[in-house]
Image: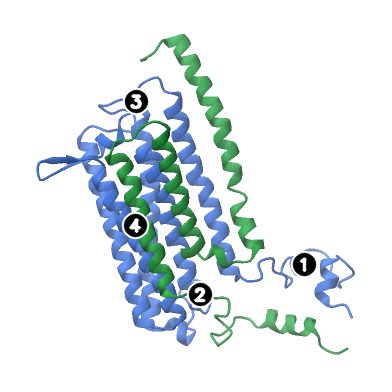
Chain colours: A blue, B green
Amino acid sequence: MTTDVELANRGASLIRPPGLRGVAADWSSDQRAFKSASWGKAMMWIFLLSDTFIFSCFLLSYMTVRMSTTVPWPNPSAVFALTIGGTKIPLILIAIMTFILISSSGTMAMAVNFGYRRDRLKTALLMLVTAAFGATFVGMQAFEWTKLIREGVRPWGNPWGADQFGSSFFMITGFHGTHVTIGVIFLIIMARKVWRGDFDRARRGFFTSRKGRYENVEIMGLYWHFVDLVWVFIFALFYLW
Amino acid sequence: MVPTSAGRWKARGRAPIEAPGPSAHAEGQQHPIKLYLLVWGWLFVLSTCSYLVDYFGLHGYVRWFLILLFMIVKAGLIVGVFMHMAWERLALVYAILVPPVAVLVFVAIMAFESSYTYFTRIIFFGPGS
């Protein structure tokens, strides 16, 4: 006894309407490669993969300009130092930002967990805490940008060394900060949905008109953890190198 | 003879949008909170370690090795546990984690290219220009 699916996998004679309708029927036929991941989760992963390539290209171009310049690269440890209480502490702001982002990842993971337990209140609260951490991170980044711009860092030059430092810095951290900002906005939207019980009552979303599930919290979490993941690489390769 | 898997497949595929029922979150990832707290703690420890590399001013190969080591372990923890990659099916894991390997090839190409650029700059402009 062969099933429809087995036939389709062998490309055997499934009766399809001719022309484009047949193409659409084939492409939308019920087959899934990722058996354990819903389409939403699979698509988020594929989006994150493409985003990985974008950030890889930024970090690669940074590597290329840093390796090929004959002018010494500014020392990030000194550039990002802050004077607190009279002592100059290297890279302290970046370290704090790192801890904030890691903490936000922790609260996000807990939110996903409570979401699957259908604990609406805790899920929404933890998502809001995550959003607050994210907003703090962006705020500190704005502070850092302001400080550096006041000190004369521009995309085309800076007082301490290779001109490419500024363009790499603004491009990489700017793009990452944009991701965090978008994440914060999405977190707030999702927290509101959770709070209101959209996922319990299968209320249709305002944008896609589809009924949401608590898996949406996990998919949101994937994005947020990715933002944290990118920061791990930026922290290591840009700030510490 | 009668409705085997095909019937069930169809029935599931045709259901327009799954209402949240007991089966709706069967694909979800449920793990003990303790695990997340543990990973969270480790991420803190590893971040502190990589910060200390800078604080104590380690240089040269030791610095690069430690930075990359902490970076990779942190990335692994985030992807594996927080993003649940450790519990996904291999089909998804390979589809997502194998393509970034191409980036490493790109890194090698660009490292080669930029050392050549550096070399020509030294030759033609002299150091410091």
Q: Which residue is mark 1?
A: A26
Amino acid type shown at disc 4: Phe
| Mark number displayed over residue B44 | 4
Q: Earlier in the sequence, mark 1 or mark 2?
A: 1
Q: Are marks 4 and 2 on the same chain?
A: no
Closer mark to the observer between disc 4 and disc 2: 4
Q: Secondary structure at mark 3?
A: loop
Residue A102 visible in image: yes
Pointer 3 or 1: first along the chain: 1
Label 4 packing within 10 angstroms: few (<14), some (14-19), many (20+) = some
Give the foreground label among 4 and 3.
4
Which sits earlier in the primary sequence, circle 2 or circle 3?
Answer: 3
Residue B48 horizontal/vertical position (percent): 32, 51
Which chain is indicated by disc 1?
A
Q: Are marks 1 and 4 in contact (CB under 8 Å)?
A: no
Numbered label attached to residue A215: 2
Labels 1 & 2 near each other (Cβ < 8 A) = no
Query: Residue at label 3?
Result: A162
